[in-house]
Image (cartoon, helix red, strand yellow):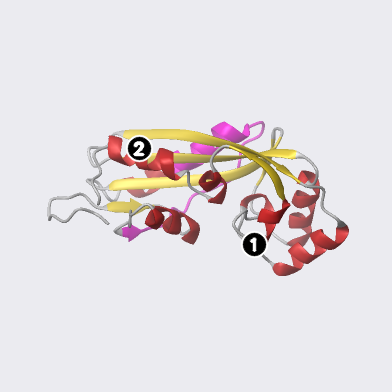
Amino acid sequence: MRVSGSDTPILILASASPRRSELLAGIGITPDKIIPADIDESSVVGELPRPYAQRMAIEKAQAISGAHKGAYILAADTIVAVGRRILPKPENAREANTFLSLMSGRAHRVYTGVCLVAPDGDMTSRVVETRLKMKRLSATELSAYIASNEWQGKAGGYGIQGRAGAFISNINGSYTNVVGLPVYETRNMLVGAGYKYG
């Protein structure tokens, strides 16, 4: 919860993701407003996963900050990558099946770009990386997961906080980063920019 006071700048979360709101709430931070950024999220030819995640977070923050000067603007973008290939949110069950089949029995990485615009306009951003390995999925496991529809709206076609958590055999790095927001790093960015809560 934000420290009360009429002169306290508000915090705007530039994301409609309920998972990000829940993660922030878990550490006692409740955004004053949630304003999703409407930007083109297409990657450019040859763009690598890490810089893509950072660019998306920055562009989301910039899309909101112009009309809300004097506020804290927090934006994030989470992507899944196998090697140099970026796996976005699947558009349909067939694409989700393709993504999960690609990760089955292999290592992959999750990158979350986080960008914070402070009330004075100062911008900071960083990318947090988590490395994971997914067990080899049987045809039955894969079809059952696709049928559950949990893949919808999730980068790479899975959410570690749901049924797919049973598919991850190894994780190296931040768990909350995989869910959608690295809370340790995000809190440090907010506090470092003078955001007060408690």
- Give the residues in magenta: 33-59
Q: Give me the residue at 22% from left, 37% from top.
A: 120
SS label for mark 1: loop
Say which residue label 2 marks.
Answer: 189
Q: CA distance from mark 2 to mark 1?
A: 30 Å
Let me know if residue 63 is in the magenta part. no
Judge whether 122 appears above or below 195 on screen: above
User: For the residue marked with disc 2, what is the amino acid?
Assistant: Met
From where the camera sits, is residue 90 visible? no
Would residue 108 appear left or right of 140 to someone viewing this image? Answer: left
Secondary element under disc 2, as helix, strand or loop, is helix
Q: Residue at x 47, y 43 (%)?
A: 182
Task: Examine the image and state in which quarter residue 35 appears.
Answer: bottom left
Foreground of the two, 59 or 33: 33
Provide the residue designation for mark 1: 152
Residue type, mark 1 in image:
Gln
Q: Where does the image place residue 195, in percent across and percent down from the top left?
A: 25, 43
State the residue in front, 6 or 94.
6
